[in-house]
Image (tube, rainbow, N blue to C red):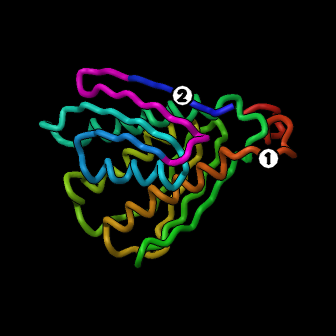
Amino acid sequence: MERTAAVTRTTKETDIAVRLNLDGSGKAEISTGIGFFDHMLNGFARHGLFDLNCQVKGDLEVDCHHTIEDTGIVLGQAIRKAVGDKKGIVRYGTCILPMDESLVLCSLDLSGRPYYVSDVEFPTERVGEMDTQMVKEFFYAVSYSAAMNLHFKMLSGGNSHHMIEGMFKAFAKALDMAAAHDPRITDVLSTKGSL
């Protein structure tokens, strides 16, 4: 059975609807009002082989903060819901991904315990209409809403666009790995018996 989730969230700042299929083929329909962010979410879906529909209306007349952070919250909730009881999944995923001059490491654990660590600093304040400081806010929101332990290390940086794109693609590959089923795992991969 395909592992899917649909999550909506409406506040005075944003109106967000996300549909996610962890067992998809990389199809994406993305509209956030922020071109570069759309590009990153498309890359996430394509490289993780997730089907993702993400429709966002946010208060972009203020700035991009609420739109990006709240999308992270809803995507994290969708990931947590789609993963389900975690029986039979690998749980851990790691990817070291090159993007031209940049090289990024992403490692995550679908542990049920949220934590976010990143050493990434960008040389520019913006890429397109997206503030680079929002990359941290997005992934922090994803990690806490999905209840995952998420780490990034920028092993080699340079161009902000390449660095961010590398992060989104590495996250997709690591999540795909962590959510994969292994027939040798008959319950959850934990000595506690639950995740």
In percent of width and height, residue 47 lies at 51, 55
- The answer to whether residue 148 is left or right of residue 188 is left
Residue 12 counted in the magenta span: yes
Image height of 171 relative to 56, above or below: below
| Number of dots carrying numbers | 2
The residue lying toward the viewer, choosing from 88 and 188, is 88
In percent of width and height, residue 18 lies at 42, 31
Amino acid type, residue under disc 2 in the picture: Ala
Reading the image, the residue beneath label 1 is 182
- The answer to whether residue 108 is left or right of residue 45 is right
| Residue 171: mark | none
Amino acid type, residue under disc 1 in the picture: Asp
Residue stretch rendered in magenta on the structure: 9-26
Q: Locate the N terminus and report the quarter of the image it occupies.
A: top right
**Residue extending furthest toward the bottom:** 101
Category of crowding for the residue at label 2, using alpha-carbon neighbours closer than 10 angstroms: few (below 14), some (14–19), many (at least 20):
many
Category of crowding for the residue at label 1, using alpha-carbon neighbours closer than 10 angstroms: few (below 14), some (14–19), many (at least 20):
few
Q: Which residue is at a point 41% across and 76% down the rendered structure image?
A: 100
Q: Locate the C terminus and report the quarter of the image it occupies.
A: top right
Q: Which residue is at a point 55% across and 49% down the rendered structure image?
A: 49
Q: Earlier in the sequence, mark 1 or mark 2?
A: 2
The span from disc 1 to disc 2 (Cα, nearest Å) is 21 Å
Q: Which residue is at a point 36% across and 52% down the rendered structure image?
A: 135
- The answer to whether residue 22 is left or right of residue 122 is right
Residue 187 counted in the magenta span: no
| Res 67 quadrant in image | top left
Reading the image, the residue beneath label 2 is 5
Mark yes or no: residue 102 visible.
yes
The residue lying toward the viewer, choosing from 124 and 129, is 129
Q: Which residue is at a point 44% across and 64% down the rendered structure image?
A: 166
In percent of width and height, residue 96 lies at 57, 67
